[in-house]
Image (spheres, helix red, strand yellow):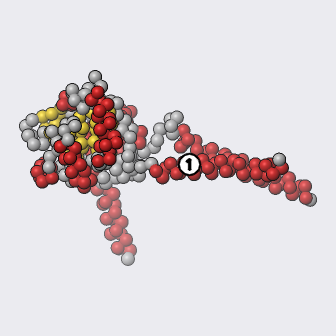
Amino acid sequence: MKKLAQYTPFILPGLVLLFLIGLFARGLFLDPSKVESPLIGKPAPAFSLPELKQPDKRLDQGLFQGQVTLLNVWGAWCVACHEEHPVLVELAARKLLPIYGLDYHDDPQAALAMLEKDGDPYTAVLFDASGDVAIDWGVYGAPESFLVDKHGMIRDKYIGPITPEIIETRLVPMLKQLQAEP
Amino acid sequence: MRAAFAILALLYAGLALAIDSEPPFADPALQARYEQLTHEFRCLVCQDETVADSNAELAADFRRQIHGMVEAGRSEAEIRQYMVSRYGNFVLYKPPVRGSTALLWAGPFILLLLALTVVARVVRRRASAEEGSS
């Protein structure tokens, strides 16, 4: 009993230390570059943008109605987008869902050249010259991708390049679930 | 040497001024509101800089948006709401006081209180030990 009493002054500092170690360990594995989007579960922000390949055609948020869609935010200036591109081309070939592009802050010639050279996974590409629509979507870097359900609601967001792992473990299961929804 | 420093200082001053490319408002009250707001938001690319201090393209876009909204007569609360609804609370450079951030705000004070209690106890124990020995 006396022995136990001897250790009591160390109990509180010990607990505090353990708590701090836990807190710092958690911080170590959090990725600060991934900021959770408050738009998940909300309707897709409204827009009206020209199509990159047919500039006199305009598209709006109505394109999300009736189908589960992936909106991929990219630019020819973005290094990580070039890295992601072949994965998107492969995904498009599987015809699981339409992929729409949101090309922002870009030179349209450079964007078209990239699609010409590396393949075009997009059903259509929205061209956002000023980046205003990107801000409406809470985009802060590229690439970013949004999974939008049949009713035009944003259901998931992938920050950074989409990888084959993300497709298999997150996108495809979620897609199946969303497609089964009424 | 001194001349070299002067030139350098001038260069840096030029650099600091060059960040914001938005035209100043004619109304000083609007200009003040704009400047205050750009200092309030975080540039999400660089994360440790405010929108006013960052050279990132995203920060320039944010400044353009904020400038437009101030010009359109939107209130500070409306502009704050606009940013938070798109980017979440993280876009606020100073986190709001909430349940989820309570520890962040109260933490340092709790730790200080804890440290003071420990010090007080040690001092008291030493004093009583000295009394006992003398």
Whole-percent x, y for residue A149 in the image: 27, 30
Residue displayed at 18% across by 49% down: A106
Q: In this image, A41 relative to A13: left or right?
A: left
Residue extending farthest to the top is: A182
Residue A176 x, y percent position in the rendering:
29, 33
Looking at this view, is A165 or B48 the one in front?
A165
Q: Is residue A163 visible?
A: yes
Please tell me which residue lies in front, B18 or A162: A162
| Image: B24 above or below A45 | below
Residue picked out by circle 1:
A22
Residue at coordinates 28% horizontally, 42% vertically from top-left? A145
Q: Chain of mark 1?
A: A
Horizontal side of residue A141 vs B91, given as left or right: left
**Residue A130 appears left or right of A26:** left
Q: Residue B12 in the image: x percent, y percent? A: 34, 63
Locate the C terminus of chain B by quadrant.
bottom right
Task: Tell me if residue B67 can be seen.
Answer: no
Classed neighbour count for the residue bearing mark 1: other residues with Cα under 10 Å, few (<14), some (14–19), many (≥20): few
Label 1: which secondary element: helix
Could you say which quadrant of the image residue B78 lies in? top left
Q: Amino acid at mark 1?
A: Gly
Q: Residue at x 36, y 47 (%)?
A: B44
